[in-house]
Amino acid sequence: MTDNVDSNRDSSRPPSASAAVTNAALRDWFVREVLPLEAALTQFLRHNWRNKSDIPDLVQEVYARVYEAARKEMPDQAKSFVFTTAHNLLIDRVRREKIVQFETVSELDTLAIAADEPAPDRSAIARDELRRLAVALDRLSPRTREVVTMRRIEGLARAEIAQRLGITEVTVKWHLNEGLRALADDLYGGNKS
Amino acid sequence: MSTADIQTRAADWVNQHRDSGDWTAEDQAALDAWLAQSPEHVVAYWRLDAAWERTQRLVALRPGAPERARGQIWRHLFRFAAAIIVVAAGAGAAFYLSRPAAPEIRRFATEVGARKTIKLPDGSQIELNTNSVLRIAPGPNPRMAWLDAGEAYFKIQHDSAHPFVVMAQGRRVVDLGTEFLVKSEPRRLEVALVAGRAQLDSPGDPAQEPAVLTPGDVAIATANAISVTAKTAKTLTDELSWRQGVLVFKYTTLADAAAEFNRYNTRKIVIADPAAAKLTIVGTFPSNDVSAFTDAAQAIFGLKIQNRRGEIAITR
């Protein structure tokens, strides 16, 4: 895909039909309304799709579709919009795949039930945030946890972490990237296998 | 690029941008170019960037005792050094911050039960609550204040070149475009962020990582730790009701409510009965109307009100 990102910095591009949706507003909306649905979205996809190894791809594609649509017009109801998008994506995939799985198609009917589940209580999430973070940190692999702890909690420089642990800075960087990915999966509750 | 590849790349961008300290215009251009390649890149980046922001709170897990100064923190300090050096004049910055008194500094104080609004030339506004002391840096456009006691609400005209700095109990709050509350109690400092962004750090203890606050965040700093929790907008509004001259209680124990009233009144309420102290009330009271509160206690709980010398005792 070659679509440009609707960046605020980019003044050379003419504003689109509904330029009201700025990139910053869109990001806020996405972080505030869409990301908290990840656990429910993942559950829905797992429920309705046989090949579980496809789930991370599907989640990402739902996000990308939601993003593209929201750039043009921000949906009123994030939740129903996200699940409708997921539903349509699965139908597209079923059509595209040569072998149609009857089971998959019939299970799509459960959409209504899954989408009606209550959204997680945001204030409860906020209250528990630090505890969740601590638990998520605990679930990292030992070396990654060590590196993330040294960098993010103790504030050590990357070079110093490398020196202390006897690893290269590139490896430190790798652990920080892995750590961030795993923490995000844990915090948003999706992409877990 | 596979989903896993995109996520790895996005994590790398986020860590570079957020955490490496030397982000250049070229880096930004390269990131923009990568984001422009596909919506998948944008959403993956946003998701991990938001996760990075959330993990900022991990700072609160840091053990209190500093082992030694740490490079990264010093860089943070130097970033704000400009604001400090202007007034430090020869003294070490840390030394100056721990002893901020200077002759031309203007001092504002409120009596028990009083409130005061201080308007600064740039349009910034500081509301001082009951029994509080605030000092403001000298000069035509002060960008630094010290809350020596009590509580103050800051509504600051943001100027990114000159961030407004509030010092309290050796901690520092740096505004990044902000409305916030600072409440100084014995051995406890509370900073509640209402709008914008602010940073809370500890210049006297460079080993403590700064906490970046976003709206709804309430940071509590004790002797050697800073913890951050989030409150709802409604709860924050209730806590700021003193700006309207009222106290809002939501299932507050009589003991806590009395303590709150006592901040605003010289005639102190004493709850003489331990069981009565645990009763909870809901209501909004004028902060200077003790009798409205004692009347309610009498009417609702059937408690007895006794006027003693200089205090009001509530008994069963």
Image (spheres, coloured by chain):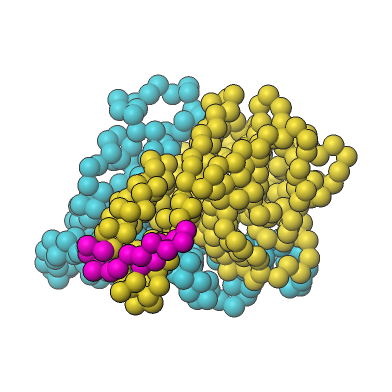
Quadrant placement of the N terminus of chain A: top left
Q: Quadrant of residue B136?
A: top right
B269 and A111: which one is in front?
Answer: B269
Tell me, yes or no, if residue A34 can be seen here.
Answer: no
Residue A14 percent across, percent down from the top left: 40, 21
Left or right: residue B302 versus residue A178 is: left
> In the rendering, what colour is chain A?
cyan
Residue at x 69%, y 54% (from the top left corner): B170
Residue at x 32%, y 59% (from the top left corner): B294
Q: Quadrant of residue A145?
A: bottom right
Chain ID, yellow in image: B
Tell me, yes or no, if residue B70 can be seen here.
Answer: yes
Residue A154 percent across, percent down from the top left: 67, 65
Q: Tell me if residue A88 is in the magenta stretch.
A: no
Quadrant placement of the C terminus of chain A: bottom left
Instruction: Give the magenta part as a residue range.
Output: B298-314
Q: Is residue B61 above or below residue B275?
A: above
Residue B138 percent across, percent down from the top left: 71, 31
Residue farthest toward the right in the current orientation of the protein = B90
